[in-house]
Amino acid sequence: MSLPKLHYIADPMCSWCWGFAPVMEAIRADYDERLDIQLICGGLRPGNAEAFTEDWRRVVLHHWHEVNAMTGQPFNFELAMPEGWRYDTEPSARAAVAVRQLSPGAAIDFLEIAQRAFYAENLDVTDEAVLADLAEEAGVPRFEFLEKFNDPNTKWCAQSDFARARSYGITGFPSIILEDDREPILLTFGYQNYEVLQPRIEQWLDSVMLDSEG
């Protein structure tokens, strides 16, 4: 019998997803044997070509400070997002899809590694050389990653992830969908702490068990 699914819909360059990383770690630690936990890359700003301005940077940093204050996740505010940089989230999302294809169990690990690199270490996760370094950190050989990352099919798969998130009605991240043989249900849309989510997951798993016994 296949496990019920937990779809984690996130983006490597979403600050609230970085804030949610410890919650996701707790979910994986407690439910890895009871749920098939899968990453779907939602697509925050894929293909964005607009150059960063100081005004835009000020707005984004305001959100980063909010996430830091609520979650305690580390941010480096000083050197982030220089003027002229492009906030294109497609490469990092495609990288996560490439890692998922090569090593499914490492996809969420890579997501967190990329988030830490971007938010806490000020690395440019739109750069494929940086992404290859991070894939190696997640246990994926550099050559294999680069080959998969630059495969046109991987680009298509990333776009399919974005479309799949939209098909669930998801417009913001992080979000979690729970799914079994019944209709998928939304566990959370946006940040929630683990103490809120854990009893909801338990209640849903109880309903799955009752439905299977019925």
Image (tube, rainbow, N blue to C red):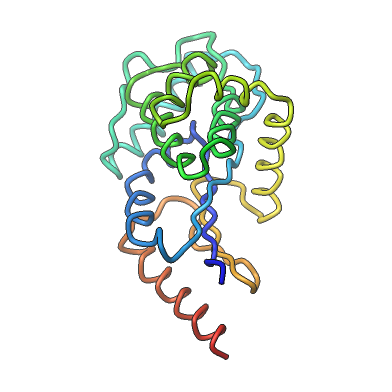
- Give the position of the N terminus as an image quadrant: bottom right
202 or 191, which lies in front? 202
Residue 182 location, quadrant: bottom right
Q: Position of residue 70 (x, y in %)?
A: 30, 44
Viewport quadrant of the C terminus = bottom right
Depth check, front residue: 154 or 22: 154
Q: Residue furthest bottom?
A: 214
**Horizontal side of residue 132 vs 156, given as left or right:** left
- Residue 45 shown left or right of residue 23 in the figure: right
Residue 90, x across and y down, in percent: 61, 27
Please tell me whether residue 169 is drawn above or below residue 144 in the rendered image.
below
The residue that appears at 33% across and 55% down in the rendered structure is 29
Point 41% across, 17% down: residue:
123
> For the point 62% across and 66% down, which residue is it?
184
Q: Nearer the viewer, residue 141 or 118?
A: 141
Q: How many marks?
A: 0
Question: Residue 6: image x %, image y %?
Answer: 51, 59
- Identify whether 180 is placed above or below 39: below
In this rendering, the answer to whether 96 lies above or below 29 is above
Nearest to the observer: residue 54 or residue 96 = 96
On the image, the x and y values in percent for residue 183 come to 65, 71
Relative to 130, 90 lies left or right = right
Q: Residue at x 31, y 16 (%)?
A: 78
Q: Is residue 87 left or right of residue 47?
A: left
